[in-house]
Amino acid sequence: MSGQPSVILATAAYDHMIRFWEAKSGRCYRALQYPDSQVNRLEITPDKQYLAAAGNPHIKLLKSTPTEPNRSEQLHIFLCWKVITYESHAGNVMAVGFQCDGNWMYSGSEDGTIKIWDLRAPGCQREYESRAAVNTVVLHPNQTELISGDQNGNIRVWDLTANSCSCELVNRSPSCGTAASVVAANNRGTCYVWRLRRGAQAMTYFEPLHKLQAHDGYILKCLLSPEFCDPHRYLATASSDHTVKIWNVDGFTLERTLVGHQRWVWDCIFSVDGAYLITASSDATARLWSVSTGEAIRVYQGQKPTVCCALHDGAETPSTA
């Protein structure tokens, strides 16, 4: 992969375009037409080879770089490189992600299901029924549990070894963060924090840790910074109030408020070291922020209202397929 960028940053907007950006300069160096539907979520495979675009009602894996390198400064617009299409959902796919080795993918949809796809075999291998439209799904760091949140406010833990729901928290919130601690947020601006524990007979349960009134408007995304970030770990909350707030996980005190977007902030993602945050907003921009100072370092513009972003600035994880 000699032509592969060390940092891959992509955004998707209402204009059915997926754009790739040079993170430092802010230049859009590649744009892909995605005419089939809107894009709800983007995710990059651990080996940086592919970009997953979650749409309606499908998921498509796209090559993250073209077969021919871009040798000029001119923006190149391509028809989407459709590598493989995953078609089993019956509604908007709102969540997509990958196992750490990139061997399988998970997804969640407004059709009320969570699905697992083995990338080395055709079709959907597993399906779990949430009984309500699924807003989000994340993979536990132990790689053996999925955590989902749905529109009825239910959070469920799906044990992939037992192939069943091992824990359920009813009527709390529609979205959840990731890691051994679970953070969920609702449309009233409230965050709830739990720690996943193992009880008798190895049953999983939620231990309440904190309740946080983070925003006055909707919380559209909540995200914990990567584990083992020094010196602190943070929680980011993106809101309809046009701001993103950064909270110190030690006590959940407000560290700073990121101000600059002019409309709803739909998505955010931390850099691998937790030092930077990318945000995507309806104001037709994505922004790169310094978490330590709260300053906007770069603005990525020249697109329509932006609904999601994906970043991979870490080391490549070779697939074991």
Image (cartoon, rainbow, N blue to C red):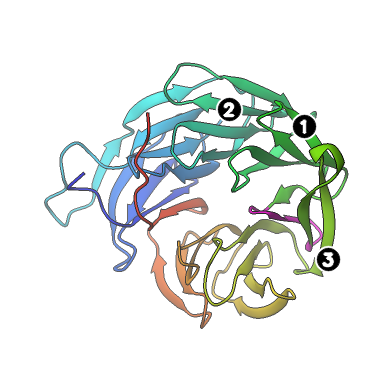
Identify residue for label 2.
116
The stretch of residues the image draws in magenta is: 177-191
Sort mark 3 into few (<14), some (14-19) or many (20+) by Cα contacts within 10 Å.
some
| Number of the front mark, 1 or 2 | 1
What kind of element bears circle 3?
strand
Q: Quadrant of residue 119?
A: top left
- Quarter the N terminus occupies: top left
Q: Residue at x 56, y 61 (%)?
A: 227
Three-letter amino acid code of the residue under disc 3: Lys
* Residue 225 shown in magenta: no
For this orientation, the residue located farthest to the front is: 201
| Number of the front mark, 1 or 3 | 1
* Above-or-below relation of 34 to 220: above
Q: Position of residue 162 (x, y in %)?
A: 71, 27
* Above-or-below relation of 21 to 114: below
- Quarter the C terminus occupies: top left
Distance of mark 1 from mark 2, alpha carbons?
14 Å
Q: Residue at x 74, y 39 (%)?
A: 157
Three-letter amino acid code of the residue under disc 1: Cys
- State yes or no: discs 1 and 3 in contact (Cβ < 8 Å): no
Sort mark 2 into few (<14), some (14-19) or many (20+) by Cα contacts within 10 Å.
many
Identify residue for label 1.
165
Distance of mark 3 from mark 2, alpha carbons?
32 Å
Precedes in sequence: disc 1 or disc 2: 2
Does the image show residue 281?
A: no
Q: Nearer the viewer, residue 110 or 156?
A: 156
What kind of element bears circle 2?
strand
Identify residue for label 3.
211
